Image (cartoon, coloured by chain):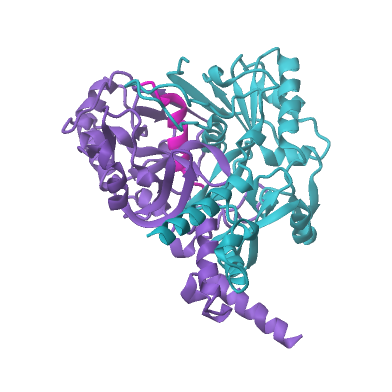
Chain colours: A purple, B cyan
C-alpha cells in the first residue's frame, strides 16, 4: 500500500445555518464551488446532519430524550450540575448524554444524533458524488470525551466511501516483523484532523481533506458501525463505580464460580477459574 | 481566537534509522532542509525518541520491563497469546503493555517509552528552534487502543511549545450560548493527523503540520502531562472485570457505607449515601 506523503485540510466556508429539511448535499456542493477532487474526504459535523434531519427536541425534554436514546447505561458521573450519563446508544456507540448536544443549537432546543449516522453519511456521499462526479468519501464527526485523558477529540460516528479501519494485521513493519495487532482507525483520525480546522465556534461544519485518496473507496465499504466494539468484548463496558457496586451486591450471595452470570467477561471468568485450580493444586 | 482555515501535513522524508545515541534534532533539521516555518508543529513518533535515548531492552525481558514501567494495573485482557496488561505508568498515563513496543524495533528487542516524554519533547523543540531560528512546536505521538472502539489512533504522550488543550469553557458558540464543558485536545488531534501521513510501516517517523501556528507557544506551556486525568477522577480507572471482582470480595464483608474505602469515587459514594437517605425517608 502506498502511503500519501502529504495531505491538506481546509474548512469549507459559506455553508451557513442549517435548518430542519435543508438539503445538506446542495449546501455542501454550493459551498465547494467546483473545488472537490477525486479522493477528497468530507468531514461533516454530525450536528448539521441532525439539524437537516430535524433531530431537534425541546431542551426541557433533554433528560427524557437521553433515556430514549439509551440502550444501556455504562457509567454515571456525579458533578455540581447534576448527573451525566455515559451510555451505549441503540447503535452500540458509547457517548456522554447519548450524544445529545446543547451547543450551537437554537436557544431552548437540543439535538439528537442522526437516527442512523452511517446511512446519513451514505446519503451525503452518494448525493455529492452524483452532483459533482467526484469520488469523495464522507466522515460524520462528533466530539467525544474519553477515559483516562482530559479534553475531547472528534471521532467518526458515521462514514461512507472511506476505509474506516486499516487492518494491518498480517503485514510487516519496516524491519520485516509482523504488525500483529496493528489496526489504525483512520476514520477517527480524519475526524480529529477535521476538528483542528473546523473549530467549535466558527460556524464551519465541514472540512475537506485532500491527498488521502488511498482511504476512499466504494460506498458499500463498512461504515463507522465497524468501529464500535461490542460490550461483551470490552474491558471497560461498565464504569468502575457501577462495576464495584454490582460486584458487592453479587458478593453477598454468589461465589466466583458464578462469574459469567454476574457480568465477568468470558476470558476473565476462565482465568479466575484456572488460577483457582492452580491454587488448589499447590 | 482566529481559527486557521486550512493546514497541511507532510511526512518528513529521509530521517532513516535512529540508533541509541543518535542526535534526533540533527536528523530532523537535516531532513527538513530549511523548510520549517514559524508555527510549524513536528509530530514525532515516540518510538524514534526511545531509540535515540537508548530505551531498548531484550525481548525476553519484556514482561519484567512492563512490570517496572507499571505504577498500577488498570485491567488485564486474556487472549489466545496470553495476557495483556493495561496499566497506568509512572507518569499517570494509561496504555496497553505500558507502551512497551515490539514493532519497528531491532529483532530480539523491544522499546520502552521515553523516561520523561514532555522533557524529550522540550529538548527536541528547543534544539530545533535554536538550529533553525523557527518557532516550532513538538508533539510526541504513540499509538493507543481505546475503550469502546476498535482500532487504534495516535495520541500525544509528550508535547512542547504546543497548546495541548484548548480550554473553551467560558467562551460562547456561534449562537452565543456558553460552551460549558468544551475542552478540545488539539495535541491528540495533531498526533492523529500526523499518523495519517506517517503510517505504521513507512519508516517516516516525523510529520510536519503547517498552518496551525495559533496552537504554537512558548516552551514552558504545559506538556502532555496536562492531558492525563488523575485516576481518582476517572470513571474507568479500573477494568470492569477487576472492579466486579473487587466489589465481590468487599461485598462479603463490607456495606455500602464503606464505599470510599473500597474504591468508589467520592461523587458516587456520596450519591449512594444520599439515595440511601431518600429511601429511608419514603
The front one of B261 and A86 is B261
Query: Does B56 sit left or right of B228 as displayed?
Result: right
Q: Was residue A185 drawn as part of the magenta stretch in this picture?
A: yes
Q: Is residue A49 visible?
A: no
Query: Does B190 sit left or right of B28 as displayed?
Result: left
Q: Horizontal and vertical percent for residue A207?
A: 38, 28
Q: Horizontal and vertical percent for residue A280?
A: 71, 86
Q: Horizontal and vertical percent for residue A89?
A: 34, 53
Residue drawn 74% across and 56% down?
Answer: B66
- Give the extent of the magenta segment: A183-202
Q: Is residue B52 visible?
A: yes
Residue at the extreme front: B281
Above/below status of A279 relative to B123:
below
The quadrant holding residue A103 is top left
Residue drawn 22% across and 26% down?
Answer: A27
Q: Main secondary structure of the magenta part?
A: helix
Residue drawn 44% across and 40% down?
Answer: A144
Counting labels gives 0
- Quadrant where the C terminus of chain A lies? bottom right
Residue drawn 34% across and 50% down?
Answer: A221
Amino acid at each position: 500500500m502506498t502511503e500519501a506523503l502529504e495531505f491538506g485540510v481546509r474548512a469549507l466556508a459559506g455553508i451557513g445555518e442549517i435548518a430542519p429539511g435543508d438539503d445538506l448535499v446542495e449546501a455542501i456542493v454550493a459551498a465547494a464551488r467546483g473545488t472537490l477532487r477525486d479522493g477528497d474526504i468530507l468531514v461533516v459535523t454530525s450536528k448539521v446532519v441532525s439539524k437537516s434531519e430535524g433531530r431537534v427536541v425541546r431542551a426541557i425534554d433533554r433528560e427524557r430524550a437521553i433515556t430514549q436514546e439509551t440502550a444501556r447505561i455504562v457509567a454515571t458521573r456525579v458533578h455540581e450540575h447534576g448527573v451525566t450519563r455515559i451510555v451505549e446508544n441503540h447503535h452500540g456507540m458509547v457517548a456522554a448524554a447519548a450524544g445529545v448536544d446543547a451547543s450551537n443549537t437554537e436557544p431552548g432546543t437540543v439535538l439528537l444524533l442522526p437516527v442512523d449516522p452511517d446511512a446519513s453519511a451514505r446519503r451525503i456521499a452518494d448525493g455529492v458524488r452524483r452532483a459533482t462526479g467526484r469520488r469523495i468519501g464522507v466522515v460524520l464527526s462528533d466530539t467525544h470525551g474519553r477515559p483516562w485523558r482530559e479534553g475531547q477529540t472528534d471521532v467518526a460516528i458515521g462514514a461512507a466511501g472511506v476505509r474506516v479501519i486499516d487492518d494491518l494485521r498480517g503485514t510487516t513493519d519496516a524491519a520485516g516483523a509482523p504488525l500483529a495487532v496493528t489496526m489504525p482507525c483512520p476514520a477517527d483520525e480524519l475526524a480529529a484532523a477535521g476538528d483542528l480546522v473546523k473549530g467549535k465556534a466558527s460556524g464551519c461544519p465541514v472540512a475537506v481533506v485532500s491527498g488521502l485518496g488511498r482511504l476512499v473507496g466504494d460506498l458499500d465499504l463498512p461504515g463507522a458501525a465497524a468501529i464500535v466494539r461490542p460490550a461483551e468484548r470490552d474491558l471497560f463496558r461498565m464504569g468502575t463505580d457501577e462495576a464495584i457496586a454490582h460486584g458487592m451486591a453479587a458478593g453477598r450471595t454468589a461465589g466466583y464460580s458464578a462469574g459469567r452470570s454476574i457480568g465477568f467477561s468470558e476470558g476473565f471468568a476462565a482465568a479466575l477459574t484456572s488460577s483457582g485450580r492452580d491454587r488448589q493444586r499447590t
